[in-house]
Amino acid sequence: MRSFITVLTLAAMVAFPAMTAPADAQRQSGQVQGGRVQRPAGYPRSYDGLIADARAEGTVRIYANADKAEMVPVVAAFRRAYPGIQVLYADLGSAELYRRYTAETRAKQYSADIVWSSAMDQQIKLINDGYAQQYASPEKPALPATAVWKNMGFGVTAEPIGMAYNKKLVPAALVPQSHQQLEQLLRHRRSAFMGKVATFDPARSNVGYLYLSQDFQITRDTRSLAEAIAATRPVLATHTEEMLQGVASGKLAIAYNVIGSYALERARRDPNIGVIFPHDYTIVTSRIAFIAREARHPAAARLFLDFLLSRAGQSQLARHSLWPVRTDVPASHRLPAGQARPVRVGPQLLVNLDRLTRARFLRDWNAILASGHKTP
């Protein structure tokens, strides 16, 4: 279960002391020479001043919903590249992150320097509402055009949304490879999957709402699939981790719309878990980061954001369950271009947050769930 904490100093959690960064990381990020941190290769000379300002600030504060366990090695690599900068990391659920950051900013209290969340629509709303500042990152040319908006919102990852299943409860011959096959499986074997299917609750999970609304935008067939899921009286969850735990224990047979990178990481440790990325289409989302308009440590925030977007930072993310957005970084998994449906970082996501649109969507979803309970 995700821990709701005030602020964690990740540096204190790292089990190994600071050490010299590998050669590739030194070339791609700051390099210490004679006590002075050199700018990364290819960066403008003016970046030396940014590094000096960041070290003078000495701290960067981050609100994010990437699991802290996955971020420890990433932060350790940043601190090796830029010693002297303390990283304060609050691991929060997306809804809590949004509420806390906006409340603190409106009250003019000390809040995050960087806000980084997988709730893409909420991040775009915050940017659109004036909570972010512009920054022309030197790493922007290496990023896909779909990953940057207004030099404010930066898509740091490219994470596929898939299905997880229990291999003992779903025989290999029945494993669905597409959304249509999942629907057919649930309709033909509904009794076997009664109470054994899970998905996000779009009313309680912002990312769950995002994933399901994207499904409906991609194809009208989603309604038929949603009705088949509803007929199994599904477990409605708020986090991928709780669904994966249910699949691993056998309480659940299938979890729909889980964060695929997390599912793959869990499957590597647990042979009972299988992971599917539907071949008809797989939604690919991104964790959007922006620098807070009122950041107290703006230079350190820029430094950390650049590290996340750099080849060195993206390589670290790739090793720890967070698929990189850059295509020039080796990754253990890549989806075929025709299969991936990336969610673009941009204003079209604001449609999801329109109150009337959201209310209508959730009303329809609740009607589908209710009809599922009436299914004989």
Image (spheres, rainbow, N blue to C red):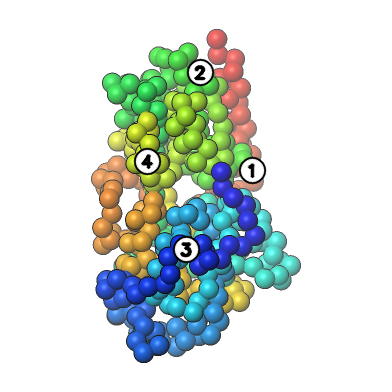
Q: Residues within 10 Å of mark 3 (few under 14, many from 20)?
A: some
Upstream in the sequence, badge 3 or badge 1? Answer: 3
Tell me the CA gap for discs 2 and 4: 27 Å
Q: Which SS class for mark 1? A: helix
Which residue position is annotated with label 3?
Answer: 14
Which residue position is annotated with label 1?
Answer: 356
Disc 4 marks a residue whose amino acid type is Arg
Furthest residue in direction right, as rendered: 107
Task: State the image coordinates of residue 154 (x, y, percent, origin top left).
Answer: 44, 63
Residue at 67% of width from left, 71% of height from top?
110
Which residue position is annotated with label 2?
Answer: 194
Disc 1 marks a residue whose amino acid type is Leu
Tell me the CA gap for discs 2 and 1: 33 Å
Tell me the CA gap for discs 3 and 2: 43 Å
Q: How many marks?
A: 4
Upstream in the sequence, badge 2 or badge 4? Answer: 2
Tell me the CA gap for discs 3 and 4: 22 Å
Which residue position is annotated with label 4?
Answer: 269
Upstream in the sequence, badge 1 or badge 4? Answer: 4
Which label sits on residue 165? none
Tell me the CA gap for discs 1 and 4: 43 Å
Which quadrant of the view contains residue 1?
Answer: top right
Upstream in the sequence, badge 3 or badge 4? Answer: 3
Disc 3 marks a residue whose amino acid type is Val
Residue at 29% of width from left, 71% of height from top?
22
Task: State the image coordinates of residue 347 (x, y, percent, origin top left).
Answer: 50, 57
